[in-house]
Amino acid sequence: MPDDSLRHLFSFLPEKKDRLACSAVSKRWFSLQLDIVYSKLTKSSSQISPRQVSRNLVGPSFSDLSLAAMLIGIDSDEILTSLSLVIQGSPFQSNNYQITDVGISMLTGVCTRLRAISLCNCTMIDNIGIACIAYNCSLLERIELTNSQLVTDEGLILLVMRCTGLSSLSLDTCRNISDHSLKAIARYSTNLKSIELVNLPLVNRCGVISILLNRIQLATFKIDSINLSDKVLFSSPQKWSLTKLKNVAVKNSGYELTYKGLECLARLARKMENLYLEGFEFAISFSGLMQILVNCHHTIKSLELVRCIASKSISLSDFCPGKHNFPRLQKVRLEQCKNISNEFLLILGQACRHIMEVSLVEIDSITNQGIIHFMQNLYHADMMRKIEITRCAKIGNPSVWAITRACGSKLKSLVIRNCKLVTDRGVSVINSRCLKLINLDLGGTRVGDAGVQQIVNAHLFHLEELSLRGCTEITDASLVAIANTPFLISLERVGLSGCTGLTKKGLELLESMAYELI
C-alpha cells in the first residue's frame, strides 16, 4: 500500500495507544506516524488553542527512537513547550543508546514552540544539534547543558544569536565553552535574568566580567569552580549597575577572590537577597562578612556559608549594634565553617530580628552556651519555623531545652541529627512545647524507647514525618507505641534505617499501619 494511503488511514486513529502500537510494527510505519504527528501539530496550532505540556525523560539510557516515541504519544491538541532529558547511565554508552543530533533535529523540527530544554549527559549532541535548536526554536527562553563535551563556542554563539529571548542559561561541565561564548551572551542575550556557570575550565575572569558589565537586569548569578579575583571586580566598578541582582552564589573560585571582592560586588548589588558562599578558606573575616551584609542590609534575606574558614575567631568587640542590623534576614546556614564560635551566634541573635530558619552543620566550636545565648537574644523568637543542628559534637540536652522554650510554640521543623549528647531527657519537653511540628528528626542521637514514648503521647496532630534513623537504643517497643498512639493522626513517614535494635516483626507492624518507612 502506498505511503499516502497508509498515512490517511493512520490519521483516523484516535487513541495514543493505537498510534504507538502501529509505530512498533516496522520502521516504515514508525516514520509515517511521525509525519502524522508533525501535520497534526501544525494543523492544531492554526485552528485551535493547544494545551501546553512538558516532558521529563530520566533514565539510564535513551535513544533517538525514545524521542520519536514520545512525540507520537503527544495528542493533537497538545504542544510541547518544555523538555528535560537526563541520562543517568554511563556517558560512554554505545551510540545506539544515546540521543544524537538526528534525534534533536527531529524533535525541534516538530516542536518549534519549545521554550525550555534541559540536556544532561547527552554526550553525543554537538554543534549540529545545538544549531537545530537555534534555527527551529526561536522562542526558547531557558536552556541547561550539563556534560555536553562536544558543544563548542561555535554552537553556543549561534544559539544566543538566534534565541534572543533567553532569560535563563545554565552551563555545567561543558569543557569546550570559553570566554568567547560569554561575551556573545553578554552582547545578544538582552533578556538574560539568570546564569549559572559550573566547572568551565576555558572560562576566565574576562568572560564573567563581560556578563556583569553588560547584563544589568541580571537577577541570579552563580559560578562554581570559575577563577575570579578581587582585582577584576575592582577594575571598573563605575561602569556597573547591578541594581536587579538578587541571587549570588560563588563556589570554589580560587584564592584570589576574598571578602574584599565580594564586598565590592555587594556594594554594586544593593538589592541582593540571597548570598551563598562555598569553599572560601581563610578568605573570610568577620568584619568583611559584616560589611558585605551592611551594603545590602535592607534586602538580604538568606545567608549560606559552606566550608568557609574565618581568618580569625570572632569576638563581641567586632560587633556594632547600630551598624550591624539586618531586619530582613530570614535564613542562615553554616556548614563546616571553622572559627565560628558562640560569640557569632550571640551577634547573630542581636542583629537578625526576623530570622525564621537556622541550620548549623558540623560546627564543632559551638556549644550549648552559644545556642542558649542565641535563643535568649532573638528579638522575635516566635517567628522561627525551622531549626537544624547536625553533627555538632558539643550540642546536648540544654540546647534542645533552650530551642523549645524560646520558639517551640510556632516551630514547624526541628532537626537534631547525629548529636550524641542528646538523650531522652532532652526530648522530654517536645511533647508540651512543640505542638505544631510537621517534621521531627532525632536521627543519630541517644534517644531510646522512653523518649519515643513521650513523643507519641504528645498532641502532635500536625506531625507528618518522624525520623529516628541511626538511633541504636530504640527497640520494637517504640514501634508498638507509634502504631498504637491516637495522637499522631497526620504521621505518614517514619525513618528507621540504621536502628539495629529493631526486628523484622516490628517493622512489619508499622508497614501494616500504612506508614512509609524511610
Image (spheres, rainbow, N blue to C red):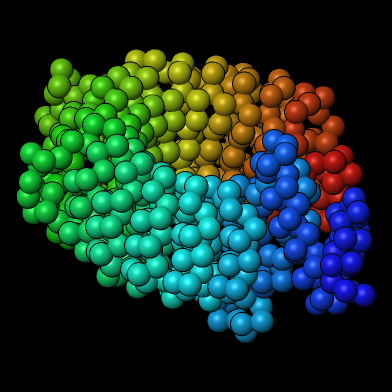
Q: Position of residue 35 (x, y in %)?
A: 75, 63
Q: Is the residue 167 above or below the residue 226 in the image?
A: above
Q: Is the residue 306 above or below the residue 288 in the image?
A: below
Number of callouts: 0
Name the residue: 58% across, 53% down: 112
Which part of the image, by quadrant, shows the N terminus? bottom right
Name the residue: 35% across, 29% down: 301
Give the side of residue 294 with respect to residue 417, left or right: left
Give the side of residue 395 with respect to residue 212, left or right: right
Image quarter for residue 428?
top right
Q: Position of residue 422 (x, y in %)?
A: 52, 40
Give the side of residue 129 with respect to residue 306, left or right: right
Name the residue: 63% across, 29% down: 438
Give the side of residue 291 with respect to residue 360, left or right: left
Q: Is the residue 398 above or below the residue 30 in the image?
A: above
Q: Position of residue 102 (x, y in %)?
A: 60, 73
Residue placed most toward the observer, 327 or 18: 18
Name the residue: 68% across, 42% down: 46
Image quarter for residue 24?
bottom right
Residue extending farthest to the bottom is 94
Asked whether the viewer can see residue 157, the reply is yes
Residue placed most toward the observer, 506 or 351: 351
Asked whether the viewer can see residue 366, the reply is no
Q: Is the residue 346 above or below the residue 216 in the image?
A: above
